[in-house]
Image (cartoon, rainbow, N blue to C red):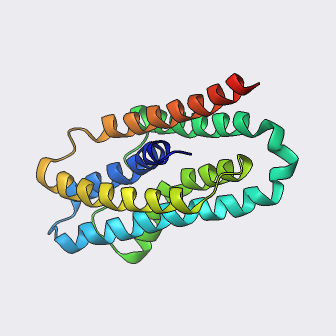
Amino acid sequence: MSFLTDFLLALGLSMDAFAVSMSSGTTIRPFRLNDALKLAFFFGGFQAFMPVLGWLGGSAVSEFVSDYAPWIAFLLLGFIGGKMIYEALYGSPEGKVSSLSYSVLFVLAIATSIDALAVGMSFAFLSTPILEPVIIIGCVTFFMSFCGAILGYRMGHFFEHEVEILGGLILIGLGCKILAEHLLWI
């Protein structure tokens, strides 16, 4: 995958964490810079770790599904993107928190990085190296989470749902790109 593709994938995956960070920034009082850093470290770390787990699991079964890998990646990214859009439009506000205990951060980090696990599986199915995308995903999510918390504190939650919709559209677009590249090579 190219750097641009990895970056766009990371941007799409980070939108959940960005939206939850933004939401947290609106509700945590008193809000401190340390809170934004905690969110960024947890979300960035989990978003980098979960694709590795997915890649390891997917590598174990990739030889059985290698002929269908682009279709599986397309379906996984499409499902994840569609789920993000659906939750942005119809989901409940369970991502809002009023304090940042480590148990709350742990649960939120897992909840926002489940899609990264599936993306890691698609990397394994496509025989894509994992190191560069994981570093990019972790760094982009760290940055987006940090900025989301600050923006949430400063501006409220004006664009919270639109950000999740954009992330979903990016993931669906990447899935379509992977499938289109496969179909062009047939």
Q: Is residue 58 left or right of residue 149?
A: right
Please indicate whether residue 145 sits to the left or right of residue 121 in the image: left
Name the residue at 52% across, 56% down: 133
**Furthest residue to the left?**
154
Q: Residue 97, located in which quarter of the rendered image?
A: bottom left
Residue 57 placed where, x, y %? 74, 61
Q: State the quadrant of the N terminus.
A: top right
Q: Residue at x 56, y 63 (%)?
A: 131
Q: Nearer the viewer, residue 80 or 177?
A: 177
Residue 31, given in percent of the width and then of the height, sits at 16, 67
Q: Decide: is 12 above or below 107.
A: above
Residue at 66 percent across and 34 percent down: it is 75
Task: Relative to 180, say whether 108 is above or below.
Answer: below
Q: Nearer the viewer, residue 118 or 21?
A: 118
Residue 36 in sight: yes
Choose top left, top right, bottom left or bottom right for residue 186. top right
Please report the residue visible at 64 percent of the width from the left and 64 percent of the height from the top: 53
- In the rendered image, is residue 110 in sight? no
125 on left or right of 118: right
Does residue 66 sit above or below 57 in this rendering?
above
Residue 182 appears at what percent x and percent y?
Answer: 69, 30
The residue lying furthest to the right in this view is: 64
Residue 143 image-quadrant placement:
bottom left
Count the marks: how many? 0
